[in-house]
Image: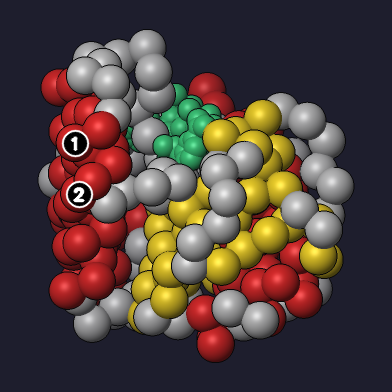
Amino acid sequence: MKVLIVGANGQVGKHLVSFIQDHKELEAKVMIRKEEQASYFNDLGAETVVVDLEEDINAIAKAAEGVDAIVFTAGSGPNTGADKTVLVDLDGAVKTMKAAEEAGVKRFVMVSSFDTTREAIQSAPSSFAPYVAAKHYADEWLKTTDLDYTIIHPGALTNDEGIGKVNAASKVERNEISREDVASVILATLENDATIGKEFQVVKGTKSIKDEINSI
Ligand code: NAP
């Protein structure tokens, strides 16, 4: 299975690309936004394509040609304003869904935020609320499509080494999770079609990632 990783140059993305390249049945196609980011991925043997999420849907659809699945793990990050949150985390995500449809790619894995409910938007601090709203509407849009989606809601991301153990369910107690373990969760999700049409929260925990994702 060939997987387009949108946001591949990000911290979760880089772990994911290297896991995919080490996997016997998976192959990464890496979507980056700067040519100079390509050599890192070429060294891993991954195909690269340079597209910015602020470009039009056709550019993203072209990047999605020939793949079997898309993982969206891009984000404008905390150092930009609400304008980029709307353009990347919301519009970029929805354009990627439309691009998937245009390119005939059914499988779509979304890396969302821990809690994207309407209540979470209302209770978020004002600086964080636009991000939660963007993630909320991106998730809602995805659920209205015919894509074979899975929505992953990770807890607060850390750069700790992965422990390979998580708690995952539709609702779990808020906690941290390492970016490396999030990448392993994405991998386990891609490997298990029973996760299609589902969404779950995931934090560090006590059960093996494979077992926990298989129980979703
Ligand atoms: P990250 O390191 O900030 O990576 C985000 C990636 O998105 C970067 O590679 C960045 O590209 C890319 N990107 C930004 N704007 C783009 C654009 N216009 N076009 C194309 N790509 C663009 O994020 P992370 O830490 O890996 O997090 C991954 C996901 O988890 C994000 O969706 C985030 O919202 C979500 N999340 C975060 C937390 C948390 O605690 N931080 C919790 C739950 C979920 P460049 O490398 O070129 O800058």
CB atoms at circles 1 and 2 under 8 Å apart? yes
Identify the secondary structure beneath mark 1.
Answer: helix
Q: Is residue 105 left or right of residue 199?
A: left
Q: Quadrant of ligand 1?
A: top left
Residue at 60% x, 34% y is 157
- Mark 1 = which residue? 122
The residue drawn where x is 58% and y is 50% is 173
Is disc 1 surrounded by few (<14), some (14 to 19) or many (20+) residues within 10 Å?
few
Q: Position of residue 59 (x, y in %)?
A: 23, 50
Q: Which quadrant does the C terminus fall into? A: bottom right
Q: Quadrant of the N terminus?
A: bottom right
Measured in 3D between alpha carbons, the distance from the residue under mark 1 to the one under mark 2, in whole angstroms, is 6 Å
Where residue 17 sits in the image (x, y, percent)? 65, 50
The residue under label 1 is which amino acid type? Gln
Look at the image and tell me whether residue 32 can be seen: no
Specify whether tag 2 is near ligand 1 (CB below 8 Å).
no
Label 1 CB-ligand 1 distance < 8 A: no
Residue 76 vs 143, above or below: the answer is above
Query: Label 2, on which residue?
Result: 118
Quarter of image, res 129: top left
Q: Is residue 36 above or below residue 31?
A: above
The residue sitting at 72% across, 48% down in the picture is: 204
The residue shown at (52%, 23%) is 36
Left or right position of 19 against 91: right
Q: Secondary structure at mark 2?
A: helix
Q: Position of residue 101 (x, y in %)?
A: 22, 73
Q: Is residue 177 left or right of residue 129?
A: right
* Label 2: few (<14), some (14–19) or many (≥20) C-alpha neighbours in 10 Å: few
Residue 86 appearing in the image? yes
